[in-house]
Amino acid sequence: MKQKNLKILTVILILLFGFESFGQQDPMYTQYMYNTLAVNPGYAGSRDALSITALLRQQWVGITGAPSTQSLVMHSPIYNDNMGLGLSVINDKIGPTQQTQVYADYSYTIQTSDNAKLAFGLKAGLSIYQADLTQLHSIAGGDQNIYNIDNKLLPNVGVGVFYYNDKGYLGLSAPKLFQPNISIYNSSTSTVSNAVLRRHYFLIGGYVFDLSEKIKFKPSFLLKAVEGAPLSADLSANFFFNNKFGLGLAHRFDDSFSGLLQYYVTPQFRIGYAYDFTTTELRHYNSGSHELMLGYDFNFVDDNRIRSPRFF
């Protein structure tokens, strides 16, 4: 009974915290290295193909109201690879709140050396927020007159720079520059609560080392900074064998350890899976987090070149 009560209390705290701070936390991904467009518009067109990536994430399995995220991103170069266009659609649900983001991306790329490029990106779109706050009172009862958020539209713009060559990359971005308020009205007390959508800054990077003809090593990182929250840091290390199979470990500081698997069915078609083991006190109430990634590159160039898989 004690464990059950602790679980119920944890769920309530997660839901309450999720609502108060949902505007300050963008969705997180363990396989961020394959979902770069979601955080940096400068990435648009960098794969020299029409690239489509779908990512499904179920966090903290076993906890009611835990985060669930679905992401679909696509991008392609245009006009002799100098420009790129992209589209990101992300749906993120946490407890009684849900946000759907639809953003268009544009990048302009300049050649900085024989094999390196620097891209400048712009992101523009909107987020649709919904919240059924009466769910927060389903266990212990309470005020049912709290005003729900129903399809609130929040337009925004973002920027990013992305430097890359055949072996590595480094990007800095702020995908949402505006910081709008969301007001919640409680009719029983005639009070208004405000939640601020905080600006996030992302620094992402990685490099592919050739350990031998058949083995490659790719370390990567993602740093996220947002006002009012600790710096979030993700580190990962992946090994690729014969350009077909990838195996790696990752660590999100003060949060989790992860195992990653990738398989390249063809140089264009890739499948990825990640499992997160929570290291916080929440580990007692969930069986981990699961993340599935599918990606495909449509190469429209008609030539006889042998294409190697891109690992970022």
Image (spheres, grey):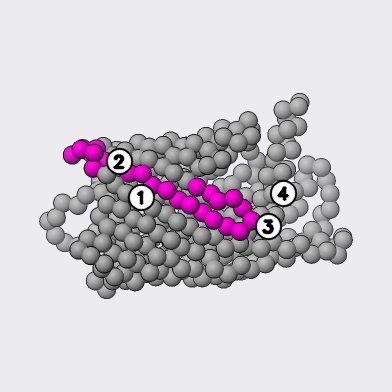
Relative vertical location of residue 191 with respect to residue 257 in this rendering, above or below:
below
Magenta highlight: main SS: strand
Q: Which mark is residue 16?
A: 4
Front of the two marks 3 and 4: 4
Farthest residue toward the right?
A: 189
Residue 223 in magenta stretch: yes
- How far apart marks 1 and 4 lie (CA) works out to 36 Å
Q: Which mark is residue 227?
A: none
- How far apart marks 2 and 4 lie (CA) works out to 41 Å
Q: Which residues are magenta?
A: 210-233
Within-10-Å neighbours for mark 1: few <14, some 14–19, many 20+: many
Residue 110, given in percent of the width and then of the height, sits at: 29, 70
Contact flag, marks 2 and 1 (Cβ < 8 Å): no
Q: Which residue is mark 3?
A: 131
What secondary structure is found at the residue carrying circle 2?
Answer: strand
Residue 162, given in percent of the width and then of the height, sits at: 37, 62
- How far apart marks 1 and 3 lie (CA) works out to 37 Å
- How far apart marks 3 and 2 lie (CA) works out to 43 Å
Q: Which mark is residue 217?
A: 2
Farthest residue toward the left?
A: 304
Residue 258 in magenta stretch: no
Q: Which residue is mark 1?
A: 206
Within-10-Å neighbours for mark 3: few <14, some 14–19, many 20+: many
